Amino acid sequence: MQHPDQAHYDAMLTLAIPAALEEDVLDFLLLHPAWAAGFSVLDAHGMGPGTAFISSMEQVWGRGRRKLVLIAGIDTDLRLLVQALAAQLPKPDIAYWINPVLCHGRLA
């Protein structure tokens, strides 16, 4: 049973962002509720090429503090959101990917 106020979400956008950009990205999302009516933010660590190490501790660990922002939505809307975010915050250390959502709903 689908919650009555839910749209049919067919995709999940994940933004992997440096922790230092969290407020900028979340402010952007809050200004665009048509694209991101709700989202979740998780703590993460980034490793590998392209990862910026802000602190000396991150350099020692070999991983950088990141945030993952998860946004369920409609694929075409999420692609527009990515384009607008790239225009507003053209940062090479913001990564994204979009995955299909096979099923979405609430338990009550």
Image: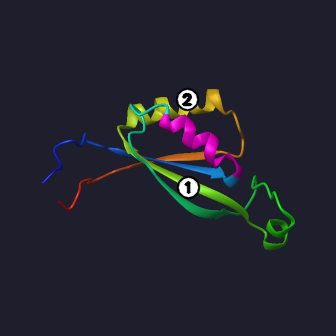
Q: Closer to the camera, 4 or 64? A: 4
State the residue lying farthest toward the bottom: 61
Assign the N terminus to one quadrant of the image. bottom left
Q: Which amino acid, mark 1?
A: Leu
Total number of numbered labels? 2
- Give the foreground label among 1 and 2: 1
* Quadrant assignment, res 68: bottom right
Q: Closer to the camera, 38 or 100? A: 38
Say which label, 1 or 2, has the lower sequence index. Answer: 1
In the image, residue 76 above or below residue 5: above
Assign the C terminus to one quadrant of the image. bottom left
- Residue 10: x and y in percent read 32, 44
In the image, residue 13 above or below residue 63: above
Say which residue appears at 71% left-offset and 38% top-offset.
Answer: 91
Magenta span main SS = helix
Q: CA distance from mark 1 to mark 2?
A: 18 Å
What is the magenta range?
20-30
Q: Secondary structure at mark 1?
A: strand
Q: Which residue is mark 2?
A: 83
Q: Secondary structure at mark 2?
A: helix
| Crowd band around label 2 with a 10 angstrom C-alpha radius: few (<14), some (14–19), many (20+) | few
- Residue 9: x and y in percent read 30, 43
Say which residue appears at 38% left-offset and 31% top-offset.
Answer: 34
Q: Which amino acid, mark 2?
A: Gln
Q: Which residue is mark 1?
A: 68
Query: Is the image coloured rainbow, by chain, by secondary structure, or in one colour?
Result: rainbow
Image side of residue 19 versus residue 32, left or right: right
Image side of residue 14 versus residue 11, left or right: right
